[in-house]
Image: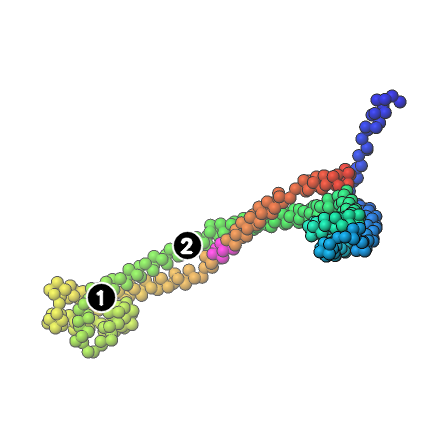
Amino acid sequence: MGVFDFVRKVLKPEPEIIEEISLENIDEWFSKKYSSKQDFLKGQIEGIQANINQEISSAKQNIDGLRNAELRNPNVPEKAKHFMEGNRNTYIQKTGQFMENLRLPQDVSLISGFLADFDAKLEEFGKSTVRSYAILKEFFEEEASRIAANIKNIDKSVSELKEAVKSSKLNELDEIRHSIAKLKNKISQNAFLEEEILKKKAQSEDLRKEKAKSEKKISEMENSSTYRDYQMIRHRHSEAKKMSAEKESEIVHIFVSLERPIKKYLRIVYNDKDLLEKYAANPVEALTHDFSLKITSLLGNMKKAVLDNTIELKDKQKVKAIEDIKKLDKEFLSRFLSDYAKLRKKENDLAKELHSYTISEDIKKAKEKLSIISAMLEKAKKDLESLNSELSKIDIGKLKEGLKEQIQSALKIKAVIS
């Protein structure tokens, strides 16, 4: 083998691991990968815990050694001895407290919390013992240094734990778990939206057909001979009603013109005062119930009162009043009643005939139904737009690519997700 062949062999990259993962079994696949990493990390934790326990045991012996250590220089002043004892007790107490609760959690999900807590405790321990440690080194350098070495080794073991946790990629695997859940949720949401869109399209189509059917029905009714007959009768009824109103206005106009003389006459008349008041209030109503046309005699008396100046009117008003009263003779009123009765009969007959038709009400109900259908169709269209908008926001392909990249980074596996 030549040198270049050897170099090519050494530099040849490891074959890429490719795994095909079905979405149906991805949770089971991930669980196995996670458990494998988790079990490996647990083994590392056990080894690191053993090292920490050994250092704690050694530290306790060294603390006892510091506690029982004698001064090498017996000539140290008493004041200095008391100062030393105070700092020795403080350092031993703080060190003992630090050594407590250094048990690593069995649940690997709690490791991150332990590490953060350890760093905080170590920093607090260093700040609270820096002075007492410096003083103790002046008196018991060897004993204090042994304890410091124990703490340093514990910190080193915890650093190894940090590296093990980092190498395990469990945090990245937790992110993969979240991405898998998100992908499956989005796939379910995508399927739900697609199904809802199909339903909404079918509903919209049904409503469009129903709307076209209603519009056709309304058009057929509005163009039917029945509706034309109805329209003709309605027009004739409207004309008859108009003619009745015009006929009424003939009498009303005269009595309105006589309003002033009638009011003055009511002050002096005693008999049939009620009848005259009825004519003043509603002449047509009063006339149709005055079968003997008693009003003519009352108006004759009122005319006499005007001529005799018993009713005081200006000359022009007097002339106008007499002219109007002359018009309202029995012949005029009888003819009016006859003509008015015919007009009202025609109006009522046409009203009855008009009432016999239901097509107008049928068209009204059909248009109300059409309005409801149109509103429902408009809502269905808006719902469909909203559903399509929601669906467009879901990119399954992008989520799969992101998940594959995470798997590649954490597990060094090229995943094919199907």
**In the image, what residue type sits under mark 2?**
Gln
Q: Circle 1 is placed at which residue position?
A: 255
As drawn, 244 above or below 38: below
Q: Is 217 left or right of 66, judged from the image as shown?
A: left
Looking at the image, which is closer to me, 86 or 395?
86
Q: Residue furthest front?
A: 75
As drawn, 118 above or below 249: above
Query: What secondary structure characterizes most of the magenta part?
Result: helix
The magenta-colored residue range is 362-370
Which numbered disc, 2 or 1, marks the residue that appears first in the sequence?
2
As drawn, 245 above or below 180: below
Look at the numbered disc 2 and give the secondary structure of its residue.
helix
Residue at 24%, 67% (x, y): give it: 333
**Corner quadrant of residue 229:** bottom left
Tag nearer the camera, 2 or 1:
1
Look at the image and tell me whether residue 177 can be seen: no
Q: Position of residue 328 (x, y in %)?
A: 20, 67
